[in-house]
Image (spheres, helix red, strand yellow):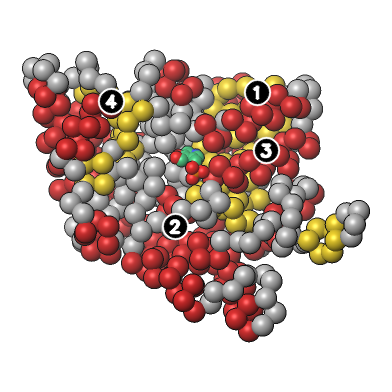
Amino acid sequence: MKDFKADFPLLNERDIAYLDNAATAQRPVPVLEAERKFYERFNANPLRGLYALGVEATEEYEKARERVRQFLHAGSTQEIIFTRNTTESINLVAYSYGLERLKPGDEILVSIAEHHSDLLPWQMVARRTGATLRFLECDPDGTFPLERIQAMVGPNTKLAAMGQVSNVLGRTAPVEELIRLVHQNGGVVLVDAAQSAPHMPVDVAALDVDFLAFSGHKLMAPMGIGVLYGKKALLDAMPPFLTGGEMIESVTREGAVYAELPHKFEAGTVNGGGAVALAAAIDYLEQVGWQEVMGREEALTKLAFDGLSQILGVHILGSQDPAEHCGILSFTVDGVHPHDIAAILDDAHVAIRAGHHCAQPLLAHLGVRSSARASIAFYNTEEDVARLVDTMKTVRRRMGLGL
Ligand SMILES: Cc1ncc(COP(=O)(O)O)c(C=O)c1O
C-alpha cells in the first residue's frame, strides 16, 4: 500500500494511530500550504476591496466556490453557499426554509440515525411551526427497507432530512429512493453528506437532491468552512438566514435589498483561507482518486472488522458485512465502558471516539447507551489497524475480566 501518511505532518510528527476520522480528518501539506498562501499572497477582505489585492482575494474565494461546484456536480456556483460547517448549513435551511414554509399538519421526516445536527434544527422547526416530526426507523443492521420509506412518505411530507452515511453505523442510506418518493409527493429533501462527501463521489444533479450539506474539516480542509448546496429556485425564494454586511445590494434607514445568490446567504466577512484550502483538499482527494480512496478504506475496514470481531466480548454495531461500514466501526465490549476502551487505546496511542456520537436516538433505538468508534481514512495503514486490534485484545484482561 502506498504511504499517504507522508503527506500529513501531524501523522509524521506524532506516534499515533489516528482512527477518529469521522470526527475530523487530518490535513495534508497541500491544504496547509493553500491556506498559508491565501494569507501570505492574497489577504484582503474578499467581496469588499476594490483595489487589486481585494479583487484577487475575491477571485481566489470564487475559484474555490467553482471547485466545490465541480466536486458536487452542481449546475451553478449560485447554488454553493459557504458556511461554517454541516450544522450551520442545516440550520440555514431550517430557519430560512423550514420556519418560512411549514405549518400545522405538515410533516418533517427524519431518520432515527440522524446526527443531532440533523435532528435538533428540525425539532425546532416542528416546535415553532406546529409541523409534526416523524421518524423513519432502521433495522438493527442499519438498513431502511424501501417499504418502510414508502409507508412513511405521503402528501404531508413537506420536508425530509437524512444522512447519506451514518456516523455511528457507517451504513449508506437509500437517499435516492427517499428523494424520489418525497418529490412524487411535492416535498423537498435535505441530505446530510458530512460522512459521505469525504468517502464517496456525491453528485447532487444525479441525486436530484434539494439541499445537501457537508463540512470541510471532515474532508481534510480547515475547521470553520462548510458547504450548503441548494437548488437555485429554492434558495432564490428563501429569505437570508443571517443579515449584516456583504449580503446586501443597498441599505436604507428602513430596510435593505439583499444581494443575489450565493452572497445573500454569506453575511459578514467570509472564511477566504478556509474556502481556498477546501478547494485544495478537493484537489488532493481527487488526485489520490476515488478508486484508491474507497479501495483502501474498504480493505482497512475489513481488516479491522475481522480483527475486532474475533475478540471475545467485542460486538460490532450494525451490519456484519464490513463492506457496509464506509470506514466506521462502532463497537462495545462486554463489561467494559467505552470510555475505558478509549483510555486503554489511548495508552497505546490509538485515537478513537467513545460516547453517544451525537446520535442518542439511534443508540436508544439500538438498545445501547454508548459505544467505542474507530473510523478509518485512506491515509491510515495496516499498522494502525494492527495496533487497534492488538490493543483491543488486552482490554478485557486489563479491566480484570479475564480474556
Ligand atoms: C452525519 C453528521 N452530520 C453532521 C455532523 C456535524 O458536523 P459539524 O460538527 O462539522 O457541523 C457530523 C459530525 O460529526 C456528522 O457525522
Which dot, 1 or 2, sits closer to the camera? Answer: 2
Task: Say which mark, if any, is on residue 222.
Answer: 2
Precedes in sequence: disc 2 or disc 4:
2
- Of labels 1 and 3, earlier in sequence is 3
Residue 56 vertical position relative to residue 191 in the rendered view, above or below = below
Q: Earlier in the sequence, mark 1 or mark 4?
A: 1
State the SS at label 4: helix
Q: Secondary structure at mark 1?
A: strand
Label 1 – label 2 distance at C-alpha? 34 Å
Element type at mark 2 = loop
Residue occupying image coordinates x 28% and y 27%:
339
Left or right of residue 84, residue 236 in this image = right
Residue 298 shows in the view: no
Q: Quadrant of the N terminus?
A: bottom left
176 vs 284, nearest the viewer: 284
Query: Mark 1, mark 3: which one is toward the viewer?
Result: 3
| Within-10-Å neighbours for mark 1: few <14, some 14–19, many 20+ | many
Disc 3 crowd rating (10 Å Cα; few below 14, some 14-19, many 20+) is many
- Is 305 rendered above or below residue 208? above
Query: Residue 325: where, in percent of width, then height?
Result: 34, 37
Q: Is residue 252 visible?
A: yes
Q: CA distance from mark 4 to mark 3?
A: 33 Å
- Cβ atoms at labels 2 and 4 below 8 Å apart: no
Residue 133, disc? 1
Q: Which residue is mark 4?
A: 338
The amino acid type of the residue labelled 2 equals Pro
Determine the residue located farthest toward the front in the rendered image.
Answer: 253
Q: Is residue 183 left or right of residue 322?
A: right
Which of the 4 image quadrants contains residue 293?
Answer: bottom left
Q: Residue at x 67, y 42 (%)?
A: 93
Q: Which residue is mark 3?
A: 94
